[in-house]
Amino acid sequence: MTWRFALVIEPAASDDPRHDFAGTFTVIDASAPALTVGELSTQRGDGVFESIGVVDGHAQEVAAHLERLTHSAALCDLPVPHLEQWRQAVAVAAAACGPGEAVIKLILSRGIEHGPTPTAWVIAAPAADNTSARERGVRVVTLDRGYGIDTPSRAPWLLLGAKTLSYAVNMAAIREAKRRGADDAVFVSSDGFVLEGPTSSVILRRGDVFVTPTPGAGILHGTTQLSLFDELERRGFQTAYEDVPVAALREADAAWLVSSVRLAVPVVAVDGEPLPFDPPFTGSLNAYLLSPRD
Ligand SMILES: Cc1ncc(COP(=O)(O)O)c(C=O)c1O
């Protein structure tokens, strides 16, 4: 992916009374080096981020993403982000996106070692073409995440509910899935419950009920899942947050990996066993996800 637009933000204190934050933004050359070698985001993955989907210049679900950025920052003891400042930075980046699908990333890093403030920046680029995954689906394998469903509440320092920059484990899981002949992974707890994909939430269908694993401290609360549940309820379906045993995924009437940029991708096989999928219904979910959403 070639980043087309980059903006460095001087992070404002959360109670900064200004209304206009344009003076705190510096547009930089997205292809030129920008971070100093002492950056803790690069040395330790010490920071948090968000990826926002953009459709024809409209950034989707910005408030929900900023809420999760704030939650992740709190879990990591980072300063509280100034929501209006970030909202304006997203608007500037969205205006640079042009037609079609794009992605805006927000990054809040702990900054330079012993430095006075965090480092923050926003980048934007055209999104990869996800048509094939949306239409043909993905084969997943379940991978043990190595902890029980109650571990996150006993060990909050594992930061399992924060969207931190440390995605090396998530990327390793996708490589492992590919080694096993699949396209993507679904993390499961060591006591056998479905958690999430390495870059997505899991939704499964049981008749007219749509279920997702309870977003406790162990998984991210997906903005796409939240938005889809609202839409499914508008269409008259029931939705539920549950502890989902792995067997329930294998026996589901359908399942999807959902996320802000890839959107709703049907799961067509779990651990080599086929799962039913319904292309027109998935198409209708993606048509909704591609419509302007706030
Ligand atoms: C680990 C993980 N879970 C869930 C999600 C889905 O979140 P969202 O729908 O807000 O993109 C993501 C998105 O990247 C993710 O990385």
Image (cartoon, rainbow, N blue to C red):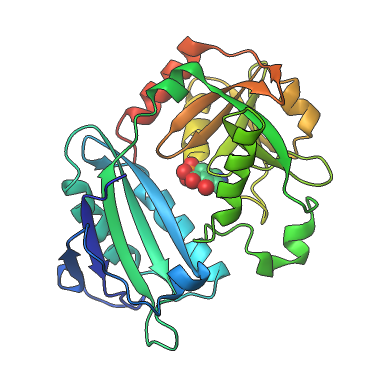
Whether residue 105 can be seen here = yes
Answer above or below: position of 288 versus 280.
below
Query: Dividing the picture into quarters, in which one does residue 111 lie?
Result: bottom left
The residue sitting at the right extreme is 191
Q: Quadrant of the N terminus?
A: top left
* Residue at figure coordinates x 67%, y 65% from the top left: 158
Is residue 262 rendered to the left or right of residue 213? Answer: left
* Residue at figure coordinates x 54%, y 55% from the top left: 167
* x and y percentages locating residue 147 in the rendered image: 78, 54
Answer above or below: position of 36 versus 171.
below
Is residue 24 rendered to the left or right of residue 144? Answer: left
Query: Dividing the picture into quarters, in which one does residue 262 lie?
Result: top left
* x and y percentages locating residue 172 in the rendered image: 60, 48
Q: Quadrant of the C terminus?
A: top left
* Residue at figure coordinates x 46%, y 10% from the top left: 280
Front residue of 3 and 121: 3
* x and y percentages locating residue 224 in the rendered image: 47, 38
Whether residue 221 can be seen here = no
Front residue of 216 and 31: 31
* Residue at figure coordinates x 58%, y 14% from the top left: 277
The number of discs equals 0
Front residue of 217 and 187: 187
Query: Dividing the picture into quarters, in which one does residue 109 lie?
Result: bottom left
Is residue 284 rendered to the left or right of residue 174? Answer: left
